[in-house]
Image (tube, grey):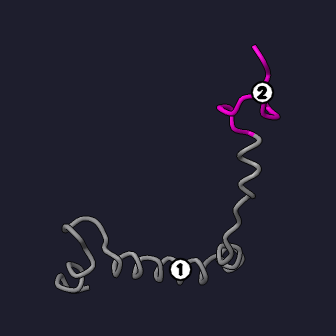
Amino acid sequence: MPATTRNEMLVDGIHFNAAGNKAVNEQLHSKLSAEFPSLAQSLERWQFPAASKYVTEDPWIVNNSTETGG
């Protein structure tokens, strides 16, 4: 990659800007798809637990379901 192209993808000479992040993401997905197709497929869909899971486990909430007393 030419230095001018590389520099266009950096904010401050070290950190990627939006274009740099996009290029890295594309390269990473390409490599994962080629080398680990089943992993690449599983990463296409984000999986987050419901927020209610964290509310019930929050140790800073008085009388939540995980409080042990003291």
Nearest to the observer: residue 64 or residue 13: 64
Within-10-Å neighbours for mark 2: few <14, some 14–19, many 20+: some
Q: Is residue 18 left or right of residue 29?
A: left
The mark found on residue 61 in the picture is: none
**Image location (x, y in percent) of residue 4:** 17, 85
Q: Which residue type does callout 2 highlight?
A: Glu
Q: Check disc 1 and give the amino acid type.
A: Lys
- Residue 58: image quadrant is top right
Determine which residue is flagged by label 1: 31
Q: Position of residue 30 (x, y in %)?
A: 53, 84
Disc 1 crowd, CA 10 A, few/some/many (<14, 14-19, 20+):
few
Residue visible at 72% across and 29% down in the picture: 62
| Magenta segment includes 63 | yes
**Is the C terminus in the top left, top right, bottom left or bottom right quadrant?**
top right
Residue occupied by mark 2? 67
Residue 11 left/right relative to 19: left
**Residue drawn 20% across the image and 78% down it:** 7
Magenta residues, as a range?
57-70
**Residue at the outermost right position:** 65
Q: Secondary structure at mark 2?
A: loop
Q: Are marks 1 and 2 in contact (CB under 8 Å)?
A: no
Q: Earlier in the sequence, mark 1 or mark 2?
A: 1
